[in-house]
């Protein structure tokens, strides 16, 4: 079972704290990717504090528990913060983000031995394939737990994603819940300008997936979609959630622009952001 199972009000408070962590982490080293991290915070908090069954007594095999893989590894700040806040490692370690010899590198990796990380990611387009392999392994091992994976909409331009999508449907990988962060932005501009994605729902349905859509910045709608996705597993089709989010969500001057994909706030901007991300009792590291 999930060791937390928080209420929606508690999830909102945790999300505000995670967003505080994100802006402080990237500001401290003037490096990192705050935009997508802020936009996906509610998703990560929902998974780790309400939805997934897992243990913080971490092991790489993950037998008998749900697994999560991050494909768009550049949004590592939100994952690191969520893992720390969920109890995988000490929150104080967030202060080492992107520093020499830190376990919290810019893109998640396994050689540092960071609890919660099972595969290196950030080479875009590969996460879905990894998740499918893990889900298929669970089936072969008669493990009834689920596998979750998050991708960015920009990385769906990668051809490997569509090869994996065909494979998952063909092999009826129905213990997989994939999500695409559909914020419409990537490093060079909007996804429509760089490489239009067209009707993603129709495309994944044509590939044989069960497709859901939701608002990734509304806990009520997001949790309902994740619960619907769980109920849809075991019926012969992989599950895809198209999750609409706002890049930079929670910090008004970062919202909706690709310019904050990989830019850190300066001192003044950090203070403005923290004022907008107020929590009842801040527990900054």
Image (cartoon, rainbow, N blue to C red):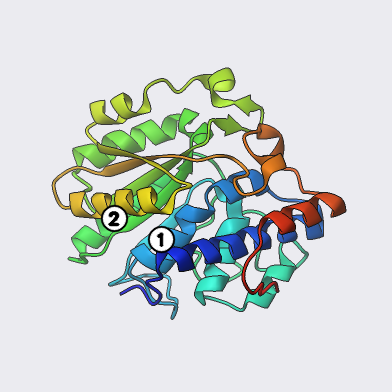
Quarter the N terminus occupies: bottom left
Q: Does 274 sit left or right of 211 as displayed? A: right
Q: Earlier in the sequence, mark 2 or mark 1?
A: 1
Q: Which mark is residue 47?
A: 1
Front in this rendered view, residue 56 or 254: 254
Q: For residue 108, what is the image quadrant?
A: bottom right
Front in this rendered view, residue 178 or 113: 178
Front in this rendered view, residue 165 or 137: 165
Is residue 53 something that shows in the picture? yes
Q: Does 267 sit left or right of 166 as displayed? A: right
Q: Residue at x 68, y 76 (%)?
A: 92
**Residue 55, x across and y down, in percent:** 39, 76
Q: Residue at x 41, y 59 (%)?
A: 68
Position of residue 116 relative to residue 43, above or below, is below
Q: Which mark is residue 36?
A: none
**Residue 196, x across and y down, in percent:** 49, 19
Position of residue 39 relative to residue 88, above or below, is above
Secondary structure of residue under mark 2: helix
Q: For residue 17, what is the image quadrant?
A: bottom right
Secondary structure of residue under mark 1: helix
Q: Residue at x 51, y 35 (%)?
A: 155
Position of residue 268 relative to residue 60, above or below, is above
Q: Does 276 sit left or right of 71 as displayed? A: right
Is residue 102 something that shows in the picture? no
Position of residue 179 relative to residue 139, above or below, is above
- Which residue of the protein is positioned furthest toward the left in this rendering? 235
Q: How many marks?
A: 2
Q: Which mark is residue 135?
A: 2
Q: Residues within 10 Å of mark 2 (few under 14, many from 20)?
A: many
Front in this rendered view, residue 21 or 77: 21
Check if mark 2's residue and mark 1's residue have beta carbons within 8 Å: no
């Amino acid at each position: 079972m999930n060791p937390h199972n928080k209420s929606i009000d508690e999830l909102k408070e945790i999300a505000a704290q995670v967003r505080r962590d994100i802006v402080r982490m990237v500001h401290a080293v003037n490096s990192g990717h705050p935009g997508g991290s802020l936009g996906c915070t509610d998703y990560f908090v929902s998974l780790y504090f309400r939805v997934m069954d897992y243990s913080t007594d971490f092991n790489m095999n993950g037998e008998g528990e749900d697994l999560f893989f991050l494909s768009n590894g550049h949004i590592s700040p939100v994952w690191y913060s969520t893992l720390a806040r969920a109890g995988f490692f000490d929150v104080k370690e967030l202060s080492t983000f992107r520093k020499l010899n830190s376990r919290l590198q810019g893109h998640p990796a396994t050689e540092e031995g960071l609890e919660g990380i099972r595969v290196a990611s950030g080479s875009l387009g590969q996460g879905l394939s990894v998740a499918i392999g893990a889900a298929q392994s669970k089936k072969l091992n008669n493990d009834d737990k689920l596998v979750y994976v998050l991708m960015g909409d920009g990385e769906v331009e990668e051809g490997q994603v569509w090869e994996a999508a065909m494979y998952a449907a063909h092999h009826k990988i129905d213990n997989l819940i994939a999500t695409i962060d559909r914020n419409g932005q990537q490093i060079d501009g909007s996804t429509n300008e760089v490489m239009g994605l067209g009707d993603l729902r129709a495309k994944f349905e044509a590939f044989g997936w069960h497709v859901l859509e939701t608002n990734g910045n509304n806990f009520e709608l997001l949790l309902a979609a994740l619960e619907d996705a769980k109920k849809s597993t075991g019926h012969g089709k992989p599950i895809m959630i198209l999750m609409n989010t706002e890049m930079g969500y929670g910090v008004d001057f970062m919202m909706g622009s690709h310019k904050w994909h990989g830019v850190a706030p300066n001192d003044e901007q950090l203070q403005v952001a923290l004022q907008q991300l107020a929590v009842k009792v801040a527990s900054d590291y």
